[in-house]
Every structure is written in C-alpha cells, then in structure tokens.
Amino acid sequence: MGCCGSSNPNKQIIISPLTTSPQKKNMKVCAGTFIKTQLSPFSEVYMQGNRIGLGGFGEVRRCTHRITGALRAVKIYSKELFGPNSTQQGKMLEEMEILRKLDHPNIIRVYDFFEDSKNYYLVMEYCEGGELFNKIEKMAKFSEDDAALIMRQLMSVVAFCHSMGVIHRDLKPENIMVEERSRKLNIKIADFGTACYLDQNHETTGVIGTAYYMAPEVFAGSYNEACDVWSCGVIMYILLTGNPPFGGKTDEEIIAKVKEGAYKTDSPEFSLISPEAIDLIKKLIAPLNERISASQSLSHPWLNRSRPTVEAPVLKAVITNLQDFRSTLKLRDAILTFITSQLVNYRELKELRDAFVILDHDGDGKIGKEDLFEQLSGIVPGDAAYTQAEEILMNVDSNNDGYIEFTEYLRATIDKKVLLSNENLLAAFSILDKHKTGKISVADFMSVLADREEYDLNLWSELVREANPDGRGEFDMEEFTKLLMNKI
C-alpha cells in the first residue's frame, strides 16, 4: 500500500503539454482516499502519549500530530500476536479497508496507518468522553430524550453500514464512544475489528460478538445484517432500564436466555417508559422474521423526537452554499477534501452537523436526490426543485456514488475562512511538502492525495499542469495559497 514516484524527491519534473485523459475525468476523491500506509515511521509523524485502552490486539494510546498539534488516538496492534499470514492479521487489515469506505458523522474518523517491525498503528479520532459504557455505569439509566438521541445516531450508522454492505457484528456500549466530556451526547461508533462485508448470496457465518448483545441466529452460525439491529435493541433496553434484557452469571446462562428470546417489558422499571419506546424495543429485539431493518427503524416516531434543529438562517446558508458549490480543478478539489477530512475539527461544526441530519430526511447517513428535493420543494417550485437537486448532487458528489456523504457535504458548506484558515493552509502545505524543500512536487501531491489505483505520474503531472500552467511541476507556499483561494 505504498506509493510510487521519482526516486529522487528533489528532482524537478518537466510536465508535458496539457491533455485531458479519461483517467482524470473519472478520478474520484473522497475521505478514504487519504487513509493509506504511511512510509514515514509513526514516531516521526506522531508523539505517543499515555495508554487509554487495552485489548487482545494490543493497546490504545493518545498521540499528538507533530505538525498540527491535533490530539488523536492510536490503536497499536502487536505483531507478536500475529503469526505470518494469520487470520488475525487479515482481519486487522480488513478493518482499515472497511473504515476507509465509511464516511459518516457518527463513525470514528481514521487518519493514518503505519507499520514497523514490531507493530501496526491505526490512527483515529480521539473521543475525550470515553466509552458510552462508562456513562451507563455512572448514570444507571438515561432519560427517554437522551436515549432517543443516542439511538437515532446509532441506527443511522447501522443503516449506513448496511447500505454499504458492511455488518459490524459487535455493537455494544464499549464500542460506542462519546465525543466530548460535556453533557453533549454526540457518539462515534468504533472498533470495526469484527466487521465483515455482507454477501447478498450467502448468510454470514462465525459465532462472533459479546453474549449480552448477540442475536439468537448468530449462535446458530448463519445470519445476516439483522444481527446488528438486535444488538441495537439490547443497547436501547439497557439505556432506558439500566439492565440487560437477558441476564445471567455466566455466558452460558445468557446465551440460553437469548436463544429463548423471552424478556420483560411489563416490570416496574417500564412503568415510566413510554409505549412508543417499548414498541420500538419489541421491533428491534424480535424474531428474525419480525425484526425491522435499521432503515425502517429511523421512521419510528420514538426516534423522531430526537431530531436536531437549527436556526433558519443557518439552514438557508447551508442550502445556498450547496447550490453555489462548483467543482473546479481536480487538484484543488483533492486538496480541499484532504483539508476537510484530515485537518478540520468537526467538534467546532455543530450547526453544520445538525443541518446535515436535517437534510438527511431518511436518516441513513447520506444525502440523496430525494432528500435534496424534499428540502428544496419548500423553497422553489416542484420542477425547479428537482432540477436543482440534480445539479447539487452532480456538483457536490465528488466520488460519483449518487449520494452526498459527510465529507463532501462539509467541503461544500463549511465557511471558507474556517476551511482555508492560515493554520490549515500551513499545516496542509507542511504535510504535502514531504521532503521539506519548501515546494510541493508532483510526486509529493501524488503520495498524499492519490488513491491507490491512481498512482500514475502522468496523471498527476497533468493535474499539476492544469492547476499551475506557468509553473514547472511544483508549488511554493504562495502558489499553493493562490490555488486554494481560487486565484489561479
């Protein structure tokens, strides 16, 4: 998963006359593009901090990005635990591949991947609020409003993952992180180490998960994505009551009760819980042929009580920015996507995140044509609304998958003063200037910004030539700033 380029990083590359290749036309840019194996040692890019978690794979530590000062977390896998070509090693690499494909506001964000002689390092977002499990221990149970807020985010993630062909298989409060220490309950789903791809032609096999949260069909060894929905129902039950629906002193006792499938919703602890909440629990913790899907759950009235609101001027500004957004130069688009996904602090964008949830009418974690049409139809006449929805999708959907995913949305709507702050410009230039020459070469751009299928020196020479026709294959800081400020 390395990159290719000139063997001499300081050698100036003379670019051939500008052409338009089919490869450039079909080039896709998304947040996952930048998650790749880094050639630099982990210790050169990050300062390692104290340990915050421990597991069978190794440990999780805080770390600080040396250029930006951003606090992140690193999951360190010890190679001593992996034999050569072992199944565990394959699963670890598959976890990274799955996370590259998942761009959702409530899925832990991944930044980098490193390997050395002793360890693998997966660098990800740091959530200072810790595990949801710890909050459950402190609070015993949650109010319905707080539980609904958590569950709507959780079900949105699950619906999104299933639409992307991914089953998590180990959803539990220990794998749900809380973004901040404050009263806010913004969550991030983490630990995709047991996740797998959904095969539409075959049931999934393998008894994987944690007994409390596993669906009965998992123990039979043949199941599909509905197992995640059952786990969500168990989490909801615990949030509202403080107790699991299927208890026991041993895993064997728990498993026996799960297989039986009987649980109570008429005990005293349910006396203050609304009928709508109980109804949703029964639809989630249900036999397989009666269980609703994650996407169906998002239209349940109990979850709709948790939808965020934003002030009208904020939503209007978001819509205007989406309408005005135009993709320009491929190189500029790639750099802006890089800054959005790798450098912007999402915690400072609460209003934009809430507006994303509002625009995402069906709650599946991405904005489609119908979502846009529904929002625009209240502003412009029907035909015009549909035309505008198509135009927005065409301009903002940079990876051409038919949806606006979270990073694409942010790139189009974030205040350019925030996105292109001096701090972000300097950090982006420093990261791209791989060899610290004061200039970014074609090979530098390619090593950071290229997807693995696009390590093509001719393609990236063409992109640089298009962006800076008067240059000779490299950008200094002044040219780089002009490019991003749209002055080239």
Image: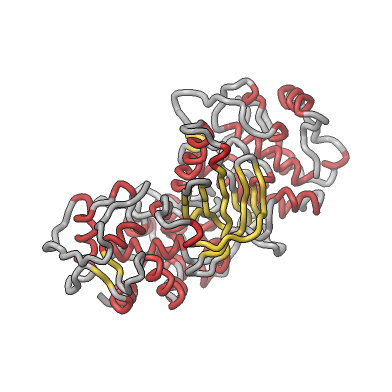
Which quadrant holds the C terminus? bottom left
Model colouring: secondary structure
The number of callouts visible is 0
Rendered location of residue 439, percent (x, y): 30, 72
Q: Closest to the observer: 374 or 290?
A: 290
Q: Identify the residue at the far left of this view.
A: 17
Instruction: Decide which of 191, 485 is in the foreground and name it.
Output: 191
- Whether residue 212 sits left or right of residue 3 in the image: it is right
Horizontally, residue 478 falls left or right of residue 154, namely left
- Quadrant in the rendering for residue 408: bottom left
Of the pair 427 and 302, the residue shown nearer to us: 427
Q: In x, y percent, where is residue 161? A: 51, 42
Query: Residue at left 61%, top 59%?
Result: 62
Residue 357 percent across, percent down from the top left: 54, 56
- Where does residue 222 sit, x and y in percent of width and height? 57, 22
Toward the front, the furthest residue is: 117
